[in-house]
Amino acid sequence: MESFYIFFPFLMWLIFLAVGMFVLYLVVQAAVRNGINTSIVGKRMKEQNEKNPKI
């Protein structure tokens, strides 16, 4: 029973760390995607890809 009290906080810490990293990944992914799509360079690349799609 003592091992439960030793490993439970560590396990909870790992779960919170994994959830936090996943949320951070989603936030960064959305920010980068929106930032690239709304930038001047991103708009120009999108226009070029629409004119000359690679098949």
Image (cartoon, rainbow, N blue to C red):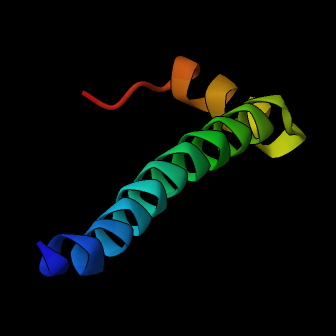
What residue is at 27 percent from the left and 81 percent from the top?
Answer: 6
**Outermost residue to the right:** 40
20, 13: nearer the viewer: 13
The residue positioned 28% from the left and 66% from the top of the image is 8
Quarter location, residue 34: top right
Q: Nearer the viewer, residue 4 or 51?
A: 4
- The vertical placement of 1 against 53, above or below, is below
Residue 16 location (% of width, % of height): 46, 56
Nearest the viewer among 32 and 8 is: 8
Residue 48 in the image: above or below residue 51: below
Question: Looking at the image, which residue is at 36% across and 56% down?
Answer: 15
User: In which quadrant is the C terminus drawn?
Assistant: top left
- Residue 47 is situated, as x and y percent measured from the top left of the image, at 68, 24
Q: In the figure, is residue 47 to the left or right of 14?
A: right
Residue lying at the far front of the rendered structure: 1
Residue located 80% across and 45% down the image: 41
Quadrant occupied by the N terminus: bottom left
- Image x and y of residue 51, in percent: 56, 20
Which residue is more in the foreground, 7 or 46? 7
* Left or right: 38, with 4 as reference point: right
Image quadrant in which you'd find residue 53: top left
